[in-house]
Image: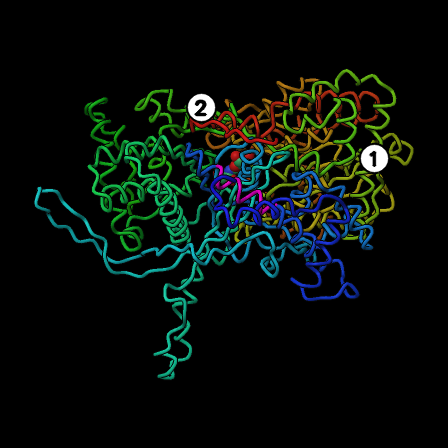
Amino acid sequence: VEASIPEPQRKAWLAHQTSGFKDKDGFETEVVRHVETTLARSMYNCDEQAAYSACSLAFRDRLILEWNRTQQRQTFADSKRVYYLSLEFLMGRALDNAMLNIGQKDVAKAGLAELGFRIEDVIEQEHDAALGNGGLGRLAACFLDSLASLNYSAWGYGLRYRYGIFKQEIIDGYQVEVPDYWLDFNPWEFPRHDVTVDIQFYGHVTKRTDDNGKTIATWEGGEIVKAVAYDVPIPGYATPSTNNLRLWSSKAASGEFDFQKFNSGDYENSVADQQRAETISAVLYPNDNLDRGKELRLKQQYFWVAASLYDIVRRFKKSRRAWKEFPDQVAIQLNDTHPTLAVVELQRILVDLEGLDWEEAWNIVTNTFGYTNHTVLPEALEKWSVPLFQHLLPRHLQLIYDINLFFLQSVERKFPKDREMLARVSIIEESQPKMVRMAHLAIVGSHKVNGVAELHSDLIKTTIFKDFVEVFGPDKFTNVTNGITPRRWLHQANPRLSELISSKTGSQNFLKDLTELAKIEHYKDDKAFRKEWAEIKYANKVRLAKHIKKTTGVDVNPSALFDVQVKRIHEYKRQQMNIFGVIHRYLTLKSLSPEERKKFQPRVSIFGGKAAPGYWMAKQIIHLINAVGAVVNNDKDIGDLLKVIFLEDYNVSKAEMIIPASDLSEHISTAGTEASGTSNMKFVLNGGLIIGTCDGANIEITREIGEQNIFLFGNLAEDVEDIRHNHTYGSYTVDPDLVKVFEAIEKGTFGEPNDFMGMISAVRDHGDFYLVSDDFHSYIETQELVDKAYRDQEGWVTKSIESVARMGFFSSDRCINEYAEGIWNIEPLAVKDQ
Ligand code: 9GP
């Protein structure tokens, strides 16, 4: 890089490279400079918000230098890049992460202290970047961290929503949604007003035949919206590599309002185009594992995919390589089906705009894409109506029909006359109206398809994608079990535990190679180590107890067992079973004498999570949890024996506080429904035990940490279908303990019973699709085992240490290396001065 800088500028460039803050004084100088110049304030009225802003800007300056160098290094290396296309990136806060990854948090802490601030208070000022719903978006964020930390040439592409996931308020026990306007001050993004792409919608297609008899299709008319790039630097841990996340924002193509309309007095309509264009990237759809089929969502998808592909192709074209080399230079990963239009768009670019033959283009396309499936839930599998497609993206619909035709012809050759097979695998569903099945398109357009945990990857091969395994053979389908970044989910969230671990492993290297955690198992009988281990957990619980007091007014005893279920509220995740279990515990306690009660293990049941605004049942679940809390928490007979807490507005930064404070967390989905789960990994990595079903990554966690360290219960995935069948066609009775719970609700113990009848009748009258009653007994029994195990505090600490020591497998670094080797065929870039 240095050699390429022209002589006159080199001296200044070299001086600039060393201009970062070397020590706390250097850091302070930068902070003060930003307060006084960039923020135009004086140090006299520098409050915590201003300190946060200045501190972020100081760190951003450092990041940017590395970011520029990384981009140059990657360009010079001219090797293959991976592009991760995700409609969601649930990043959380950036400052703490940047300080830790750069390795200068201590410097900042000391510098801020001298300026009169506690670093924790400054960090707290930052608004979460919440451009995602849950696990899928957070996984994408962990992947970005690993890609940078492992020095892969990688870009993330997403949408820059003006409003991320809504803020949740709980008012009178009900969820109320408040808009999340997070862009007031965001020092972590760089608008690239020079990087724009015109995106076309609507219009029509004309076809003509050229001199060689080839049909040329042209997409004309319609409307144009401008995509503007915003870049977010992604720092790697303990490496100078700083990758790029590019988020697209929509703007009216003209960029201005319509003067003609304005001058002729049509004031309202003069800004209409602008507003319509800006709507595209205005808001994140707040559904987790649910597809609603709305036109604006399809618009978002095409807008983002078309802009990203334009960018990727533009970069490739600079290298002046032949098109056939495209898959050697470019790997594109589809995070779920949301970016599947990219398959069609690349084919369109190659055939319509670059003039390649269909075959040659399709080869390039399929060798470029990989598709990750994250769910088997039918309601989450995307389908778009053909008439909607025809209207919005007429040329793409034609291409989809052609892709489908060639695909079905190949199926026909392999399975002659098997019409049912053709109907089942077709990209077009012959319904009324016809629908485009995005998962089918993603499979046909990719060279690899992966699930996100072993059980899930097996399930997709035997259920929803079974026919495709027959068509393409089993090798196209693979598994990459999810992982989490230990930088955020251990080092940042639980600094004391991270420090204790490094004192025993001899370095912080476990943060780069998580399998080194195994070393701490040697200390599991070391008294001092165990004592400190337990103290750290207790301190984290004290911190959470303070937060609970501050936000809910309820006193909880940090010595009680903290039992946590935090995740999106969904029937398949079964928060309803948890709260029914809590009611069962309450009824049991009430039936005992004061003496007998004393033998009970005190518990705090903690819930958190958002319900999609239109998901009535999920909202009812939130309401019941709050209603139970209102009764139980004020019952003098119960005292500290049971508390029920709903934590408002669960998000990434709250997770960083809640997870290290848990003794037990609940991952209790109906077997076969949770593709992987990733919070299960976060909880165990922080020394919490889990109660769970044989579902998703719970199974692999059990294999790694040992059956003695996890509380498994419930029916197995392989039996679920038969049980459901029996619910519908055979006889079925509700578990007697659950009946008592329902009776208590119906008696009005927790307020107006009608408010909760939906939850009860789903189990009692509507076939209990999620097997709440079938699993209830073993759930309750297993909770009793938990109580017993917790009373043996020494045994519990041993379980906790053993579990953490054996979590090495679940790093997102391992996961990214598997993608790199098995799907992307890409190697890390050598980086000097690492
Ligand atoms: O529901 C899955 C969750 O189990 C998984 O951990 C996560 C990341 O792979 O993806 C979720 N899926 C979706 O949000 C929608 O497909």
The residue at the point 27 percent across, 44 percent down is 348
The residue at the point 81 percent across, 20 percent down is 795
Q: Disc 2 or disc 1, which is closer to the eye?
A: 2
What residue is pinned by disc 1?
538
Give the left or right position of residue 332, taking residue 481 as reference.
Answer: left
Mark 2 or 1, nearer chain start: 1
Quarter residue 500 falls in:
top right
The residue at the point 56 percent across, 25 percent down is 814
In the image, the segment drawn in magenta is 63-73
Q: CA distance from mark 2 to mark 1?
A: 42 Å
Callout 1: SS: helix
**Vertical relation: 594 (above or below) 551:** above
Could you tell me the amino acid type at mark 2? Gly
Could you tell me the amino acid type at mark 1? Tyr
Q: Name the main secondary structure of what is drawn in magenta.
A: helix
* 192 is within the stretch colored magenta: no
